[in-house]
Amino acid sequence: MSDQYEYILKTEHVSKRFGTLEVLKDINLSVKKGEVICIIGPSGAGKSTFLRSLNQLEKITSGKIFIRDELFLHRENDHTVDKLPREKQQELLLEMGMVFQRFNLFPHKTVLQNVCEAPIIVKKEKKEDVEKRAKELLDRVGLSEKADEYPSRLSGGQQQRVAIARALAMNPEIMLFDEPTSALDPELVGDVLKVMKELAESGMTMLCVTHEMGFAREVADRVLFMADGIIAEEGTPEEIFTSPKAERTKNFLNAVLEA
């Protein structure tokens, strides 16, 4: 896999409409390998839709998505203008791990089976190789002793850490996190953020939609503030949290940080 590219992920003029509602408006973003980007903003700003459009869970209305400097998809007015061949698209999509608000674990499979499932089924990897890696990943997220438990026996925070291990089992180049702590009780949030922080420190490229301002401030290389379907402001954590320029950003941070 070649690292000879400028941006691991890039969007140009991405928009998304649901009927007459324009949820994303002209989103331009370039992400370098190893960058950690946190996306903050009010509910309904388009943050989750943007993340889901990157890995094709939502089809963009217009715009271009590039992965490793290759044009992955170009659409205009709900029609595909250009795209990579399906096989190549699938290959690149496997490079994107995604962790959702809800854990989406298979209830009838053990923790270890949940983590092993995709590499064995999708990538056709050898079971023994995958199991070895899965055990290492469970150890990494602090859950090696839970390998044979079923999801219903775990707390929400533990289930979310399993979901992170499951995404990592596919050896992705980039991880997308869609408010991974929002469904958790407050006392369980810390363990999940700790795993994400360690992941960032290891050099993983990460896009995180989050309402955990302390995490964004500490871990992000860049923070994007989204509102009304646009990136209203972006900068370093220092710039955004200490001296935001846009009025919307200031009002949002005042409300969130006082809460």
Image (cartoon, rainbow, N blue to C red):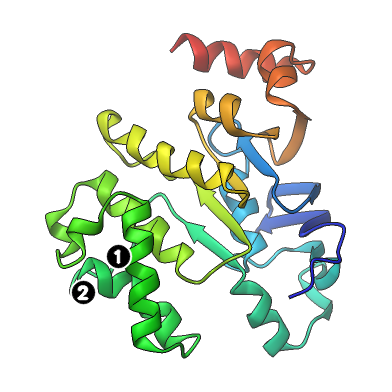
**Residue placed at 51% from the left, 60% from the top?**
98
Foreground pick, 107 / 169:
169
Foreground pick, 6 / 84:
6
**Residue 23 location, x and y as percent?**
67, 48
Tell me if label 2 and label 1 are in contact, CB under 8 Å: yes
* The quarter of the displayed image where residue 74 is located: bottom right
Residue 179, visible in the rendered structure: no
Is the residue marked by circle 1 packed among few (<14), some (14-19), or many (20+) residues within 10 Å?
some
> Mark 2 belongs to which amino acid?
Lys
**Residue placed at 40% from the left, 82% from the top?**
129
- Where disc 2 sits, the SS reads loop
Residue 258's place in the image compared with 150, above or below, is: above
Q: Which residue is mark 1?
A: 105
Is the residue marked by circle 2 packed among few (<14), some (14-19), or many (20+) residues within 10 Å?
some
Q: Could you say which disc has been placed on residue 109 in the image?
A: 2
**Residue 101 location, x and y as percent?**
40, 49
Foreground pick, 44 / 250:
250
Direction from residue 156 to residue 59 in the image, left or right: right
Q: How many marks?
A: 2
Residue 236, visible in the rendered structure: yes
Direction from residue 70 to residue 228 in the image, left or right: left
Direction from residue 172 to residue 80 in the image, left or right: right
Residue 130's place in the image compared with 173, above or below, is: below
**Residue 47 location, x and y as percent?**
61, 44
CA gap between label 2 and label 1 equals: 8 Å
**Residue placed at 17% from the left, 52% from the top?**
154
In which quadrant is the N terminus drawn? bottom right
- Where disc 1 sits, the SS reads loop
> Mark 1 belongs to which amino acid?
Leu
In which quadrant is the C terminus drawn? top left
* The quarter of the displayed image where residue 172 is located: bottom right
